[in-house]
Image (tube, grey):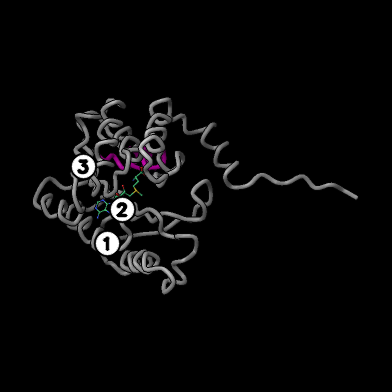
Amino acid sequence: MVEHQRRPGWAEVEEFLSQTLVHGGPGMAAVIESIDAAGMPRIEVAPTAGKLLMLLARISGARRVLEIGTLAGFSTIWLARGMPDGGHVTTCEFLPEHASVARRNIDAAGFGPMVDIRVGAALDTLVTLDGGEPYDFVFIDADKANNVEYLKWALRLTRPGAVIVMDNVVWEGAILDPVSDPDAGAIRAALEFMGASPALDATAIQTAGSKGWDGFAIAVVR
Ligand code: SAM
């Protein structure tokens, strides 16, 4: 009888990809340690996704980034790493305790002057940004219930050609069974909004790895 070896799984492949390609450096490992040390939830993006955010910001030539959902600043730092000199990141975080961990991490990573953390409900913060210089890149990764509203604000606060990335759009497939989970319903509504909006050209990519089965949507503002 032939013995079959167990094939590696998503998480092992992701670890290989992270080790081989991401090169986050000790600063990024310290951010993850700060999340554990503060007893915060491990809901930051995977390192491969963080680096993707950096690359997308760089590829799109973004100089002004808006992030909704800071946690400990892991994705914020990746985004800041994609900015040119003079770039700016505004990041919105509801919980002051998350914001203060993020502040320490962002300062320690050397991006303090570039990053403005706005504490409070993002919908309250976004109103205050109206009428300012438009953003080039928006990353939506906070409470899923408000995703459609965040997309509407993203459209209002950006210029044509801006990029919008929305995380967690597959939710372990629950978007196809939204009655069982209100967040899944809100995520699905946001995808439908993106697909129907004449102001957006969008797609979504499913992902599997350390964060389970999920995905992100990406859109460009027409
Ligand atoms: N983008 C982060 C990263 O990848 O490192 C992870 C963000 S985490 C998934 C979501 C964050 O959004 C949490 O820190 C949570 O406190 C925050 N949040 C939840 N509801 C919010 C709201 N209404 N306004 C602003 N932030 C909110």
According to the picture, the residue beneath numbered tag 3 turns out to be 90
Write the residue at 38% across / 41% down: 39
Disc 3 residue: CB within 8 Å of ligand 1: no
Residue 49 screen position, x and y as percent: 43, 43
Whether residues under marks 1 and 2 lie with C-beta atoms below 8 angstroms apart, the answer is yes
Q: CA distance from mark 1 to mark 3?
A: 18 Å
Instruction: Choose between 14 and 30: the one closer to the eye.
Output: 30
According to the picture, the residue beneath numbered tag 2 turns out to be 142
Q: Crowding near pointer 3: few (<14 within 10 Å), some, many (20+)? A: many
Q: Amino acid at mark 1?
A: Asn
According to the picture, the residue beneath numbered tag 1 turns out to be 146
Left or right position of 82 against 121: right
Disc 2 residue: CB within 8 Å of ligand 1: yes
Quarter occupied by the C terminus? bottom left
Residue 115 screen position, x and y as percent: 22, 35
Instruction: Choose between 172 and 161: the one closer to the eye.
Output: 172
Q: Amino acid at mark 3?
A: Thr
Q: CA distance from mark 1 to mark 2?
A: 8 Å
Left or right position of 75 against 152: right
Magenta-span inclusion, residue 149 = no
Q: Which residues are magenta?
A: 51-62
Q: CA distance from mark 3 to mark 2?
A: 14 Å
Write the residue at 47% across / 55% down: 214
Write the residue at 27% across / 25% down: 110
Q: Amino acid at mark 2?
A: Ala
Mark toward the start of the polypeptide (3 vs 2)? 3
